[in-house]
Image: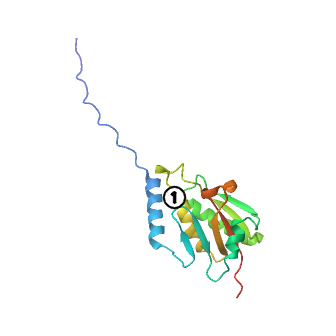
């Protein structure tokens, strides 16, 4: 009986590359490298606290104590960096049209991210500072998402 020689074993398939994850990481690094450190921008490593220069600190106190009612929410869970940035910009534009004064942005705590690092948390704060209608923001209270969300005070600066 005739038997054909066995073909040589196949080389193992290469590991798939996470192109989107790599792109997200590069976008994060680029955003952080640009920085945007402002005089009233406090990042404690786990919590954002921001007050537009020249505004009274009582605004932060009122925002933290819940004296200003949240009128709308944006949830960024599951979005990539570029999608989240666009969603924040669109949400702020809609907030301006609706004349909302306080909104909540849920960026998440990073539990679903590689290494459980909250990628959007740091970036959202930088993005918010770039919008002139954002007067202040800080970490939401425990019942509102805690370290996974921000309460944002909106308005127009009077000249």
- In this view of the protein, can residue 131 be seen by the observer? yes
Q: Quadrant of residue 107?
A: bottom right
Compared with residue 111, is residue 91 higher up or lower down, i.e. above or below? below
Element class at badge 1: helix
Q: Is residue 129 left or right of residue 143?
A: left
Q: Quadrant of residue 144?
A: bottom right
Return the residue nearer the eye: 144 or 75. 144
Mark 1 surroundings within 10 Å by alpha-carbon count, few (fewer than 14), some (14 through 19), many (20 or more): some
| Furthest residue in direction top, as rendered | 1
Q: Position of residue 45 (x, y in %)?
A: 51, 63
Q: Position of residue 88 (x, y in %)?
A: 63, 65
Q: Position of residue 128 (x, y in %)?
A: 60, 70
- In this view of the protein, can residue 94 be seen by the observer? no
Q: Position of residue 129 (x, y in %)?
A: 59, 73
Quarter of the rendering occupied by the C terminus: bottom right
Quarter of the rendering occupied by the N terminus: top left
Q: Residue at x 70, y 75 (%)?
A: 58
Q: Residue at x 34, y 39 (%)?
A: 13
Q: Residue at x 58, y 60 (%)?
A: 84
| Furthest residue in direction bottom, as rendered | 159
Q: Is residue 29 left or right of residue 145?
A: left
- Residue tagged 1: 119
Q: Quadrant of residue 54?
A: bottom right
Compared with residue 113, is residue 154 higher up or lower down, i.e. above or below? below
Q: Is residue 68 left or right of residue 92?
A: right
Number of labels in the image equals 1
Colour convention: rainbow
Return the residue nearer the eye: 109 or 32. 109
């Amino acid at each position: 009986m005739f038997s054909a020689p066995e073909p040589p074993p196949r080389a193992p398939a290469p590991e798939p590359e996470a192109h989107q994850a790599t792109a997200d990481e590069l976008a994060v690094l680029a955003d952080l490298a640009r920085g945007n450190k402002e005089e009233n921008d406090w990042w404690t490593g786990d919590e954002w606290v921001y007050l537009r220069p020249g505004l009274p600190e009582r605004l932060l106190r009122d925002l933290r104590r819940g004296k200003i009612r949240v009128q709308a929410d944006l949830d960024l869970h599951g979005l990539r960096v570029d999608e989240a940035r666009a969603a924040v910009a669109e949400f702020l534009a809609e907030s301006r049209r609706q004349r909302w004064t306080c909104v909540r942005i849920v960026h998440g705590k990073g539990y679903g991210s590689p290494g459980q690092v909250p990628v959007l948390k740091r970036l959202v704060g930088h993005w918010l500072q770039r919008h002139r209608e954002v007067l202040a923001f800080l970490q939401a209270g425990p019942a509102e998402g805690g370290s996974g969300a921000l309460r944002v005070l909106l308005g127009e600066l009077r000249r």
